Image (cartoon, rainbow, N blue to C red):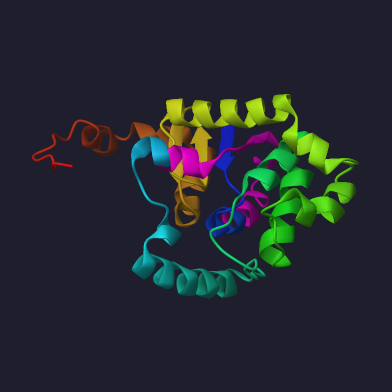
Amino acid sequence: MALRWYFDFVSPYAYLHWQKLKALPQFARIQPVPIALGAVLHHLGNLGPAEIPAKRRFIYRQLAWTAAQEGVGLHFPPAHPFNPLPALRLCIAAGSGAAAVDAIFDWIWLQGRAADDVGTLEALAAQLGVDDPATAVSALDVKEALRRNTEAAIAAGVFGVPTLSIDGELFWGNDAHPLMAAVLDDPLLLEQPAWQALLALPVAVHRSR
């Protein structure tokens, strides 16, 4: 079973979902894949949730409530949305492993620190064993790796983060975690006739853009 978890550090929902993933028995088999959510949204012609004023107001309250309900510490960084590229590239420079993902998420969303330029990440980079973060995050191979990750996510049909791909089937969102866990335990759930029938449901109307 191929398990890929697409995420961007700009998403507090990805931070909350990461805490759930770590408790899964399948966690060691999940490959974290850092992607640039902004590029995905641009490709789809969508706005991010925090770019819609009324939605931003709602989701920040909902995030605070959800974190409290789930017993997860949550402290927003100094500004949001922020430019996540330095953090994403630092993650790749550090190997994109669970320890790097964990440390960067905690830096931003548990400790509430800025991560929008390499200067704000120097102490974290040292913790991750990246001695020259400015050089590391500007390296061509690191930039290309993030671009390839993002293009692969778009090609796979990813439309938001966090998204867990289970053998190519996409499961999106922190609140969809129970369904993800159920499918991980029993992939045949997806083969139920009623669920399969939904895939053939016709579209009755198309909105003009």
User: In the picture provided, is 82 more to the left or to the right than 121?
Assistant: left
**For residue 28, what is the image quadrant?**
top right
User: In the picture provided, is 3 more to the left or to the right than 203?
Assistant: right
In the rendered image, residue 91, in percent from the top left (x then y), is placed at: 73, 41
Q: Quadrant of the C terminus?
A: top left
**Residue appearing at x 75%, y 38% in the figure:** 137
Q: Is residue 169 magenta?
A: no
State the residue in front, 95 or 99.
95
**Residue appearing at x 73%, y 34% in the figure:** 138
Residue farthest toward the left in the current orientation of the protein = 204
Query: Which segment is the magenta one?
Result: 17-41
State the residue in front, 81 or 61.
81
Q: In which quarter of the image is the N terminus?
A: top right
**For residue 51, what is the image quadrant?**
bottom left
In the rendered image, the vertical position of residue 168 relative to residue 110, given as above or below: above
Q: State whether residue 193 appears in this view.
A: yes
In the rendered image, residue 130, in percent from the top left (x then y), is placed at: 87, 41
User: In the picture provided, is 58 more to the left or to the right than 4?
Assistant: left
State the residue in front, 21 or 38.
38
Tell me how many marks there are. Answer: 0
In the rendered image, residue 44, in percent from the top left (x then y), is placed at: 35, 38
In the rendered image, residue 188, in percent from the top left (x then y), is placed at: 42, 32
**Residue appearing at x 69%, y 67% in the figure:** 112
State the residue in front, 101 or 113.
113
Q: State whether residue 94 appears in this view.
A: no
In the rendered image, the vertical position of residue 13 relative to residue 112, given as above or below: above
In the rendered image, the vertical position of residue 35 relative to residue 111, given as above or below: above
In the rendered image, the vertical position of residue 52 relative to residue 89, given as above or below: below
